[in-house]
Image (tube, rainbow, N blue to C red):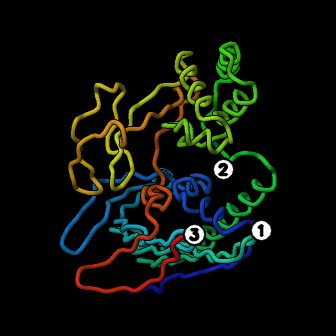
Amino acid sequence: MKYRTVARETRRDFRVPPRELWDALANTDHVDRWIGLPHVAYGPLTVTADAFYREARAGLGRLLRFTWREYPFEWVRDERYSVVRLFEAGPWSAFYGGVEIGGDAATSRLRVFAELTPRTALGWLVARRMVAKGIRDVLAYCDEVVALRSSGLDIRLPPPARVTPVDGQRLEALAAALRVEGIDERLVARFARHLRTGSDAEVLRMQPFGLADAWGADRSDVLRLLVQAERQGAAYHTWEVMCPNCRVAATRATRLDGVPERFHCDGCGVAYDADLERWVELRYSIDARLRAAKDDVYCIGGPANTPHIWAQHYLLPGTERLWSVGLP
């Protein structure tokens, strides 16, 4: 028996510029963390003559386990994104959902949509609740984006309600040590707040210059802070070897002399020469004794993962699609 697809959409205006709302929603990994979805285990890319996807697995509680094929996200920057997931078993067969953003300089007009196709009667009943809740959760996240912007705090994304706890005594000792080393008090306080409230992903593989830009701080000062934090045993560094096409980390090393001369990018299916000057990044992660952050992934394909890509669409062999893209 075939069950009708459960489809819902909601439109709402938010008092925030479309670009800022896009930046918050395009980080789909963070959105899913904030909502409270389970983390996902992704397999390698499957590439055939007529398909391009990743196998993915996740669970709800101890009893429900799901496996699906996740196809590439489609998007046009600042305007819309969507994703298709085809389930291999269980109460649902397919999911399609995403967002569209319009508006003017001060107001965003958001459309959130989701479609969940049931495979069983139970799946149909649960789908109605899940789709409605998923849309409500995205809207609540956007409300937090607006509230955060109004607060004046230099925090880019709404902090998750639950994060792995920080060892308060170790954090106080670290802050004191950083001040002794001459690190500016305001920067120390901002770093401490970041370690307490940031998501696990935000305290692992931190980019010194990215943090500095987000905080409105001097890049050299933030780099010096992280170097001192490592000397105090509160952080450690890695050298991330970036794919020149995907611009995501393809491999990493703890020492520069451990960076491979050549590496293979799973996403591109291509081997590259490692360019230390252009495609190797220094990143810092919090030490587990200070905060036992979990290196879990919640969404791997959202637009924020590859911000250099302005528009992306999935095109099957022998087919045509037409779409408009507004370029700067």
- Per the model, the C-alpha gap separating discs 3 and 1 is 16 Å
Nearer-the-camera pick, 22 or 135: 22
Q: Within 10 Å of the Cα at label 3, are there few (<14), some (14-19), or many (20+) other Cα atoms?
A: many
Disc 2 marks a residue whose amino acid type is Arg
Residue shown at 48% from the left, 74% from the top? 123
Q: Earlier in the sequence, mark 3 or mark 1?
A: 1
Quick one: quadrant of the N terminus?
Answer: bottom left
The residue where tag 2 is placed is 156
Q: Which mark is residue 243?
A: none
Measured from the top left, where is residue 94 in percent x and y? 41, 75
Q: Within 10 Å of the Cα at label 1, are there few (<14), some (14-19), or many (20+) other Cα atoms?
A: many
Q: Is residue 248 above or below residue 126?
A: above
Residue shown at 20% from the left, 49% from the top? 271
Report helix, strand or loop for mark 3: loop
Report helix, strand or loop for mark 1: loop
Measured from the top left, where is residue 328 in percent x and y? 54, 70
Measured from the top left, where is residue 208 in percent x and y? 54, 35
Asked which quadrant contains residue 117, the reply is bottom left
Disc 3 marks a residue whose amino acid type is Asp
Residue shown at 49% from the left, 76% from the top? 116
Q: Is residue 43 above or below residue 105?
A: above
The residue where tag 1 is placed is 15
The residue where tag 3 is placed is 78
Q: Within 10 Å of the Cα at label 2, are there few (<14), some (14-19), or many (20+) other Cα atoms?
A: some
